[in-house]
Amino acid sequence: MLKEVVSVTAVLAVLSGAVNAQAEGFYVKGGVGSVDFDTELVDNSFGFELGGGYQLNNHLGFEASYWNSGSADIEFYDFADDRVWGDAEVSALTIGAVLSTDMAQPLFGGARIGLSAWEQTGSLTDGYSGYYEDLDYDADGTDAYYGLFAGYNLSPNVAVVFDYTKFSGDDVDPSTFGGGVRIKF
């Protein structure tokens, strides 16, 4: 059974590549954007993404990226009305699939979905009853991510892309909205 599945997959890959050879190839991408931590306790920050991938045909690709939220401020009052403040940062390595409209057209759009290996780090200072206690935290995990994007091909090899990506995390579920450049080889 496995042999038949592999054979059918190989035939489909060859046929789809022959029909849609225009967009096929490796690419690198980079971008910046606003990060929303999906909680009132953490301020929004400004992050970045660097990555690359392979466009199998005009409609299907695979990519991997490194994403970092940048440092975000935290401030709130705990149950005893003591001020707590600090900072937080989330980084992630992602791998996933990209489904799109025809990437060879001037305007294109699509969706991405995959797995994110993330890490949340930060520090807090709790000012209780005139005393201060410093707390550091570090959490990590692997969860799904998804996103939508739209772009414009400036040339056959360079595109400007705007995207929204939603990550799942431990204490926060950050999302990004930003823009960047994609360069095809």
Image (tube, rainbow, N blue to C red):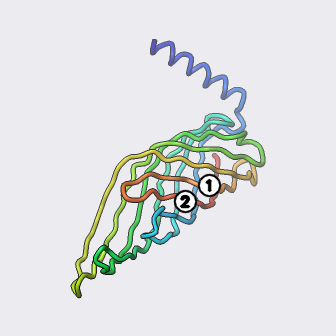
In the image, what residue type sits under mark 1?
Answer: Asp
Give the residue drawn at x 70%, y 33%.
Answer: 21
Residue 136 image point, x, y percent: 27, 69
Residue with the most extreme bottom position: 130
On screen, residue 72 above or below 94: below
Side (left or right) of 43 relative to 100: left
Say few, some or many: other residues with alpha carbon within 10 Å of mark 2 (under 14 / 14 to 19 / 20 or more). many
Question: Residue 20 got which mark?
Answer: none
Residue 46 image point, x, y percent: 52, 69
Q: Quadrant of residue 99?
A: top right
Side (left or right) of 126 relative to 150: left
Give the residue drawn at x 72%, y 46%.
Answer: 108
Q: Nearer the viewer, residue 164 or 58?
A: 164
Q: Nearer the viewer, residue 96 or 111?
A: 111
On screen, residue 182 above or below 111: below
Q: Quadrant of residue 9?
A: top right
Residue 173 image point, x, y percent: 45, 56
Give the residue drawn at x 44%, y 70%.
Answer: 42
Give the residue drawn at x 23%, y 78%.
Answer: 133
Residue 154 image point, x, y percent: 75, 54
Q: Give SS at disc 2.
A: strand
The residues tagged by marks 2 and 1 sit, at their Cα atoms, a distance apart of: 8 Å
First along the sequence among labels 2 and 1:
1
On screen, residue 19 above or below 86: above
The residue identified by callout 2 is: 176
The residue identified by callout 1 is: 163
Q: Give SS at disc 1.
A: strand
In the image, what residue type sits under mark 2?
Answer: Thr
Discs 2, 1 touching: Cβ within 8 Å: yes
Side (left or right) of 126 relative to 156: left
Residue with the most extreme right position: 106
